[in-house]
Amino acid sequence: MNDPRPQPFYITLLRHGESVGNAESRWQGQADFPLNDTGRAQARALAERWKAEGTKFDFVIASPLVRAKETAEIVASVMNLKVEFDPLWLERDNGEFAGLTAHEVRQNFQHPAFSTPYDPVGVDGEGDWELFLRAGQALHQLLKREPARYLIVSHGGLLNQVMHAVVGVAPQANNAGTRFRFGNTAFAQLMYYPHQHRWAIDKLNDHMHWKDTD
């Protein structure tokens, strides 16, 4: 007898490869830095690993920022897949910090002793709560689709808030609380069972294809 329960979602959350902005220690946000040669090599190494392991995806959805777009396209090319682009998976809008080095941000902006999750980042960018809500919306839209094997190619800030939404942890004041590590081309693997509203996290920050990723 066939099991009438819905099939699970298999979701892989992948951070883009190393970009020019990463290598220069910049607050990238939605500033559009391309991958560097290391980032392209990371993406190819991951694609070859997945191909050798027999990993399968039905859909690839990526942020349209070039560092995520290029990562997704490298992986998709090796694995013979098509890529969809969705702006819900963009990195945090970090306002006036976008594109600046960490040193420039420290030197040119005041940093309050205390901040709430509702305060903007970079003067007029997305604060933690706003980013958390967008991450929840991105996850909600994904789960409105058919259960399948999804590869999501996005950014460390947004993927952190997706993980917060999955585990039910709201953003904390003063940047406190849990952080989920995503090195360049590191990924998390999750399963969602809609008939039970149950999540299983199988992997987090897996970067075995590139041991010295950040």
Image (spheres, rainbow, N blue to C red):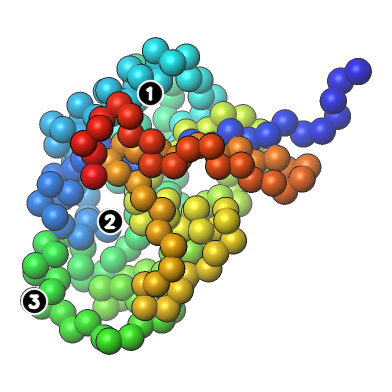
In percent of the image, x 36 and y 50: which residue is there? 181
Q: Nearer the viewer, residue 120 or 210?
A: 210
Q: Where is residue 111 in the image (x, y as percent from the top left)?
A: 22, 82
Camera-side mark, 1 or 3: 3
In the displayed structure image, the side of residue 202 where residue 173 appears, left or right: left
Q: In which quarter of the image is the N terminus?
A: top right
Q: Can residue 165 be seen in this view?
A: yes
Q: How far apart are marks 2 and 1 (CA)?
A: 23 Å
Q: Tell me, for residue 30, which label it has, or none.
A: 2
> Residue extending furthest right?
1
* Vertical position of residue 31 compared to residue 125: above or below: above
Q: Tell me, for residue 141, which label it has, or none.
A: none
Q: Is residue 130 visible?
A: no
Q: Is mark 1 on a helix, strand or loop?
A: helix
Which one is earlier in the sequence, the residue at label 1 or at label 3? 1
Which one is earlier in the sequence, the residue at label 2 or at label 3? 2
In percent of the image, x 14 and y 71: which residue is there? 105
**Residue on which the image places disc 3:** 107
Q: How far apart are marks 1 and 3 (CA)?
A: 41 Å
**Residue on which the image places disc 1:** 76
Q: Distance between the residues labelled 2 and 3?
A: 21 Å
Q: Position of residue 189 (x, y in %)?
A: 50, 37
Q: What residue type is labelled 2?
A: Gln
In the displayed structure image, the side of residue 25 where residue 58 appears, left or right: right
